[in-house]
Image (tube, rainbow, N blue to C red):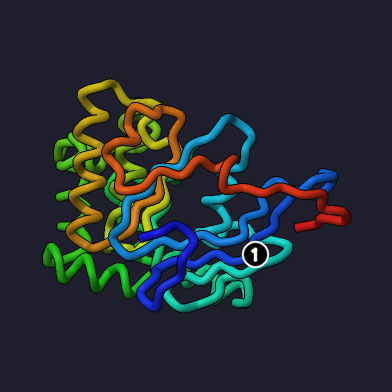
Amino acid sequence: MIQGVATAAALLQVSGLRFGWKGEKAALLQIDNLTIQPGESVFIHGPSGCGKSSLLGLLGGVLLPQAGSIQLAGADLTRLPARQRERARVDHTGFIFQQFNLIPYLGVLANVLLPCQFSSRRAARASASDGSPQRAAQRLLTAVGLDSDAHRRPVTSLSVGQQQRVAAARALIGSPELVLADEPTSALDADTQEIFLRLLFDECRRANSALLFVSHDQRLAGQFQRRIDLPALNRPAPAEGVSP
């Protein structure tokens, strides 16, 4: 598949995207065309500040651009009302945030189950694959190396690396069509990183989910089907009056 060429089967299609932060004189991101197919694994890299995290936020419907369209699973996120955009996000995307965004007053298992509480679609898929959302959550946590004793512990009692693994299990539960991972291996040692990546790839293959993976560690790039140099893809231009 050639980058930028849209097909009827595309999961994600970005066209004419332009985004900048309020108060900045220039657009941070200006991407003419980007296409992601179902089941595709994509490694995105670039220096700090080039817009990698912002791009994932846009593709997941967390941020809105000033111009362009972002078609996800047949719906244009940029045109949906806020509530429908939130529904599309939780139904179709799993997000591993750089800061994890775990709920501190919930236990480990409860954090992983959150997407299934907000999305009947994700809950139904978890039940179809594992018998119930709870069993799916338990399986994923065990797969990332957290035994049953840890499942009901507060997430605040876990190490940073363990919290990162909980965030991955939460993103993967219910087989979302698109998994967005923002520096997900930054807090993991080499052995745990290997287990973590194997889980990501296995779960995405199992569900035919596309994986967009942002990292500074270019040693990982060879494990992905496609590699995107974001500064090369991006065509920033002055953006006067930008106000997201």
Left or right, 160 with respect to 25, comes to: left
Q: Position of residue 186 (x, y in %)?
A: 40, 28
Residue type, label 1? Gly
Q: Work out whether 154 lies above or below 136.
A: above
Q: Secondary structure at mark 1?
A: strand
Q: Position of residue 39 (x, y in %)?
A: 28, 60
Looking at this rendering, what residue extends furthest in the left direction?
A: 131
What residue is pinned by disc 1? 16
Looking at this rendering, what residue extends furthest in the front direction?
A: 2
Left or right, 49 with respect to 13, comes to: right
Left or right, 229 with respect to 64, comes to: left
Question: In the depicted view, which residue is nearer to us: 6 or 157?
Answer: 6
Q: Position of residue 150 (x, y in %)?
A: 22, 36
Q: Which residue appears at 70% of the width and 54% of the height?
A: 19
Q: Position of residue 4 (x, y in %)?
A: 49, 61
Left or right, 28 with respect to 108, comes to: right
Estimate how packed mark 1 is, as few (under 14), some (14 to 19) or many (20 or more) residues with alpha carbons within 10 Å: some
Q: Which residue appears at 32% of the width and 45% of the height?
A: 168
Name the image quarter holding the N terminus.
Answer: bottom left
Looking at this rendering, what residue extends furthest in the top direction?
A: 189
